[in-house]
Amino acid sequence: MALVETLTNIDLFSELSNRELKKVASFMTPISVRAGRDLTVQGKPGREFMIIAEGTATVRRDGRVIASLGPGDFFGELAVIAGVPRTATVTADTDMVIQALNRREFSSLLDGSPKLAKKILVGAVKRLHEIEQSLVR
Ligand code: CMP
């Protein structure tokens, strides 16, 4: 399937025009990943924002599972947006295909689409809220 068509089915991109989708697709680099590989490591610097095209991954903080991610889900936005260390370790459960964007590409993506930027912002705040809740529990 063409990448633009695949992107149409991803909730994050559902409000984008065809022109915007083409722009998004042009920023993406597909990467094949083997099961078991760490895609982010908690506490380490991170340079990529990633969207899952195929496969599933587990998100862990301090060794505890906090979320599972699958096709269409994104991760890695927190370190890339703010330049802070990775807040969690994301590990491939299966062989995966990831669409990766570096900081510059991610920044261009957000500049080009306020709707998308808002969705990512809301997602990031929710994730930080969950992390904060888990700290007081
Ligand atoms: P980042 O901190 O760059 O790297 C680890 C990623 O895990 C983080 O970005 C988020 O994308 C993701 N993440 C952190 N907390 C959660 C959560 N509570 N639920 C889902 N994903 C999360």
Image (tube, rainbow, N blue to C red):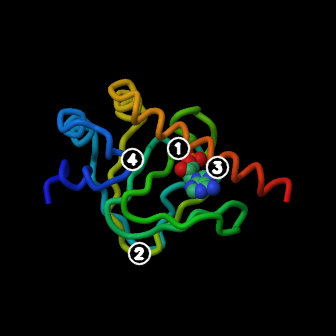
**Up/down of 122 relative to 93, above or below:** above
Residue labelled with disc 2: 94
Q: Position of residue 137 (x, y in %)?
A: 85, 60
Q: Earlier in the sequence, mark 4 or mark 1?
A: 4
Q: Name which quarter of the figure residue 84 lies in.
A: top right
Amino acid type shown at disc 2: Thr
Q: Position of residue 76 (x, y in %)?
A: 50, 47
Q: Could you tell whether 123 is left or right of 128 in the image?
A: left
Q: CA distance from mark 2 to mark 3?
A: 22 Å
Q: Earlier in the sequence, mark 1 or mark 3?
A: 1
Q: Residue at x 24, y 34 (%)?
A: 20
Tag 4 and tag 1, C-beta contact below 8 Å: no
Tell which tag, 4 or 1, sits nearer the viewer: 4
Instruction: Determine which of the numbered discs, if any, sits on residue 12 in the image.
Output: 4
**Up/down of 128 relative to 67, above or below:** above
Tag 3 and tag 4, C-beta contact below 8 Å: no
Q: Residue furthest front?
A: 15
